[in-house]
Image: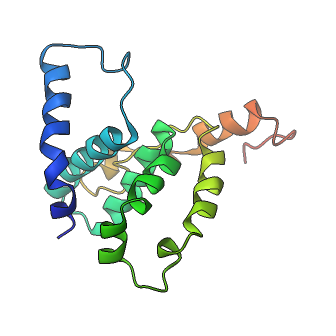
Amino acid sequence: AASREVERDFDSVYSRLVLCKTYRLDEDGKVLTPEELLYRGVQSVNVSHDAAHAQMDVKLRSLISIGLNEQVLHLWLEVLCSSLPTVEKWYQPWSFLRSPGWVQIKCELRVLSKFAFSLSPDWELPVKREDKEKKPLKEGVQDMLVKHHLFSWDIDG
């Protein structure tokens, strides 16, 4: 049901991204819109997670990981909440996302865009679980804490 919401724009965005890969255009050198990044993230999660028969909550957490890695999670929230038909269809009238209060969440998420995340969107997939470390985020989190001087003591323990 949710896929129908993005079908009208998805084909053109996906075609553009495929052309970039086909002709080896520098995808990193051009600026993708938040919508294009969202569509690319959704496509990536669907392809990798459908093969593993992942639950929707696993897909959501993986998509959030991609949004954090790309530093656009706050922009994705704006894309979704700015679409009145989408919000009205998927959220109850009393939902926080149907009120102007969603802007507060966006402001809180914007702070996260200042940090460089390197989260694995496939971490919860059972197929690849055995290949992963026991603590996949520790090194990245440790680097972030040290870089921003959030801890002055040894965090190896």
Q: Residue at x 22, y 66 (%)?
A: 2
Residue 125 visible within the image? yes
Quick one: which residue is furthest to the right in this view?
152
Return the residue nearer the eye: 116 or 2: 2
> Residue 154 vs residue 93: left or right?
right
**Which of the 4 quarters of the picture holds residue 113?**
top right
> Residue 106 vs residue 47: left or right?
right
Q: Is residue 23 above or below residue 70?
A: above
Coloration of the structure image? rainbow
Return the residue nearer the eye: 42 or 78: 78
Residue 134 visible within the image? no
Q: Residue at x 67, y 39 (%)?
A: 142
Quarter of the image with the N terminus in it = bottom left
Return the residue nearer the eye: 142 or 73: 73
Q: Is residue 44 above or below residue 30?
A: below
Q: Residue at x 27, y 45 (%)?
A: 39
Residue 33, percent from left and from top? 37, 35
Q: Is residue 22 above or below residue 131?
A: above
> Residue 25 vs residue 22: left or right?
right
Residue 72, percent from left and from top? 48, 42
**Which of the 4 quarters of the picture holds residue 108?**
bottom right
Q: Residue at x 37, y 20 (%)?
A: 28
Residue 6, percent from left and from top? 21, 55
